[in-house]
Image (tube, helix red, strand yellow):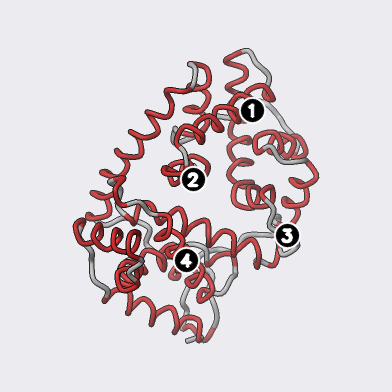
Amino acid sequence: MSLDAQYEKKLQRTAMKAEMLDVDTEYRLAVAWRDEKDEDALHRLINAYMRLAISMASKFRRYGVSQQDLIQEAGMGLMKAADKFDPDKGVRFSTYAQWWVKASIQDFVMRNYSMVRTGSTTNQKSLFFNIKRVKAQLERDAVQRNQTVTPTQILEQVSTELGVPMRDVMMMNGRMSGGDMSLNAVQSNEDEGREWIDTLADESPNSAEIVEQSFDGEKLQSWVGQAMEVLNDREKYIVVQRKMIDTPRTLESIGTELKLSKERIRQIENAALEKLKKRMGTDNQHTAIHMELA
């Protein structure tokens, strides 16, 4: 077993032994850290949710980055979340922290992953984590419309959808065009036939997580609903279709429906999101992050 795997297993064992915080205890610890900078309270809060950080870090192992480094970055995300968390908002720390943990890990991957080592701009980050999804959606849309589109046309649409220059799209597409490895491929002879699929974490939530996510989701929906009041009907419709449904629609499909150009839809969407961010303010920053990552 590699040192990296041994380190991960040791951390997992330690994390699984950490206390499970109930709502009242979590609130008390968060208040103690926020108001009194009680380091013992912070230590208990962070340790209790290291299992969350480790679980999220494991989902990024396919990018070829050291698992030990990913876990350390996830821990840094927990620290940032603790500094920003406001327990009086009525949302569990786990719900709030996951956005900071994910952002911290993504930034690290962008800085260190070999294919994108040349930089980690906002455009590169958006492309790196979204280009395959957007390409697949555009190709499905073309098939449904019985249209034939060239690879270049698809990349041009990706550029429009993500608001990223075409040259950046072509560069990232080239970097990520390598063949995919089968998850059933054997890692090495030393692993006694262990397949890559065996290393993937079980992402299905347990019963406690389902209850927490349901409660916190209602809170988030309430905040977003209040913020949406600053938008007009057209802005609301575009934001919902682009950010709040399971399969977001493309700019082109919405533009066809509303008889507007793709560029005009993109402008309206960006302006509406800016209004939402200002309306929600820094106190609800995690909601704004959720909107951007959706």
Sequence order check, earlier mark of 4 and 2: 4
Tell me what residue is drawn at x 73 percent, y 40 percent: 155
Sequence order check, earlier mark of 3 and 1: 3
Q: Which of 156 and 76 is in front in this view?
A: 76
Q: What residue type is labelled 1?
A: Arg
In the image, farthest residue toward the top: 259
Whole-Å distance between the Cαs marked 4 and 2? 17 Å
Whole-Å distance between the Cαs marked 4 and 1? 33 Å
Q: In this view, does 268 lie above or below 41?
A: above
Which structural element holds mark 1? helix
Q: What residue type is labelled 4?
A: Ala
Which structural element holds mark 3? loop
The residue beneath circle 1 is 266
Whole-Å distance between the Cαs marked 1 and 2? 19 Å
- Disc nearest the viewer among 1 and 2: 2
Mark 3, residues whose alpha carbon is within 10 Å: few (<14), some, or many (≥20)? few
Whole-Å distance between the Cαs marked 3 and 1? 26 Å
